[in-house]
Amino acid sequence: MLAKRIIPCLDVKNGRTVKGINFEGLADVGDPVELGARYALEGADELVYLDITASKEGRSTFTRIVERVADRVNIPFTVGGGISSVDDAAALLDAGADKITVNSAAVANPYLISEIAAKYGSQFVVVAIDARTIDDGSWRITTHGGSRLTDIELFEWAHRVQSLGAGEILFTSMNHDGTRSGYPCQTYAALASALDIPVIASGGAGSVSDIADVLTDGRADAALAASIFHYGEITIDALKRQLAARNIPVRL
Amino acid sequence: MIAIIDYNTGNLRSVENALNRLGAEWTLTADPEVIRRADRVLLPGVGHAGEAIGRLRESGLVEVVKRLRRPVLGICVGMQVMCRHTAEGDVEGMGLFDTRVRRFHSQPGDKVPHMGWNTISNLESKLFKGIEPGSYVYYVHSYRADLCPDTIATTRYGAAGQMFSAALKYENFYGTQFHPEKSGDVGERILQNFLKL
């Protein structure tokens, strides 16, 4: 049986792992390669590295980190942050990334998804979708870390990125991200049944129960989290054992 | 020396890195002489199997591979092109494994590609020495090989629990549908077993 995946996410700035609470007040939680290797050893099923550096020097530092991760880690990993062209994606593929993730740039230019997918395959393209609810309760896409609201409806966009060739969707509710109050499971379940590609849940996990809920009621294929792992509140191994005890299929 | 066959099949870096972690010496090559002399041959592959077999045929490598007598390991699409036929492009393969490769017949609720960690069972080869049945390996594929007498490991996927060939063996030829180079410690052990065959 296909296992539900647990994916730690590492935000990288100037060569170091950082985690922001609502993207502010960054705290340094270590060397990204060492941290990723530790997570792999603890049973992470994949890793995600996001480059949150804005500068050009930061980009080349990040590419070197991707190379080091590829040398060191024996599980798949995804990289993203600032990918806005096929060339950006190609450089990260060459550095050893298994998948890339695109977000704001895909909203600005949806054909970026189809161009990358046509060249490197759908399995290489994870489309990250950040959305929040508006007054009438419907979901709208946001870009630039949630700071810009668009008028694109969530399910419309999810269908579109799937038909453009996305291999997976990484959906974050900006209503929940950073609040540690759990995931919007009904919305996840609706996405999972609307789509033929896997959905990764992100943003909002405060407890093991939250993660268990989104993998069962929310029908998510994977859960991505950062702070609960970085600050050592629970190890990945302990989390997966608790999920297994709830009859959720995980790789132990 | 391990020869990794280079036939423009996309990124081979993860295979190279995995061999580096095992301390193995390898060379990336399309030279028939180097391939014939190698102790072990790896045939990786990502992308479209029909196109992959076309490129191997054009470069004359199909006949080179078929005549090898040392252990050969095909990975993912590399395994699929070693089968008799693949539905991806509807083309004849090398015919080393007596089976056909078909697209997953997806039931409602199943996702294709089959992507992520799944278990291997019915392990019947030295390739799996020290590997427990039920161990998890990493998959990314939409086509899979039917069960056949060459099957040396199986995996189930989907609501209907379809069973397919996770790995195949015929004489000195081996193939895995999963990616040992991305399958954590289990995958590393399988690669190590292949190097020690």
Image (cartoon, rainbow, N blue to C red):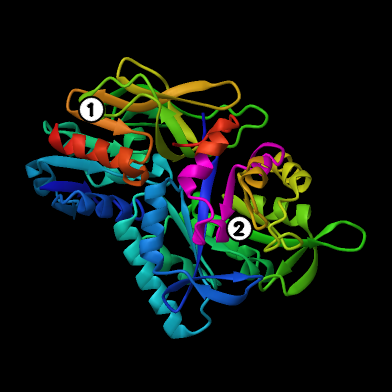
User: In this rendering, is residue A245 above or below A24?
Assistant: above
* B142 or A15: nearer the viewer: A15
Extent of the magenta region: A213-240
At label 1, the amino acid type is: Lys
* A67 or A230: nearer the viewer: A230
At label 2, the amino acid type is: Val
- Check residue A234 for magenta coloring: yes
User: In this rendering, is residue B94 above or below A107?
Assistant: above
Quick one: quadrant of the C terminus of chain B?
top left
Name which residue lies at 19% across and 32% down: B66
Q: Residue furthest right?
A: A136
Residue behind mark 1 = B129
Name which residue lies at 19% across and 51% down: B30
Q: Measuring from the top left, give residue B51's x and y in whole percent.
A: 39, 44
Label 1 Cα neighbours within 10 Å, binned few <14 / some 14-19 / many ≥20:
some
- CA distance for labels 2 and 1: 39 Å
- Identify the mark at residue A127; answer none if there is no mark: 2
Q: Measuring from the top left, give residue B101's x and y in whole percent.
A: 42, 28
Apparent side of residue B11 relative to residue A211 in the rendered image (left or right): left
Q: Measuring from the top left, give residue A249's x and y in whole percent.
A: 54, 32
Name which residue lies at 13% across and 35% down: B196
- Identify the mark at residue B1; answer none if there is no mark: none
- Check residue A243 for magenta coloring: no
Determine the secondary structure under disc 1.
loop
The chain to which mark 1 is attached is B
Apparent side of residue A179 relative to residue B2 in the rendered image (left or right): right
Q: Measuring from the top left, give residue B53's x and y in whole percent.
A: 33, 40
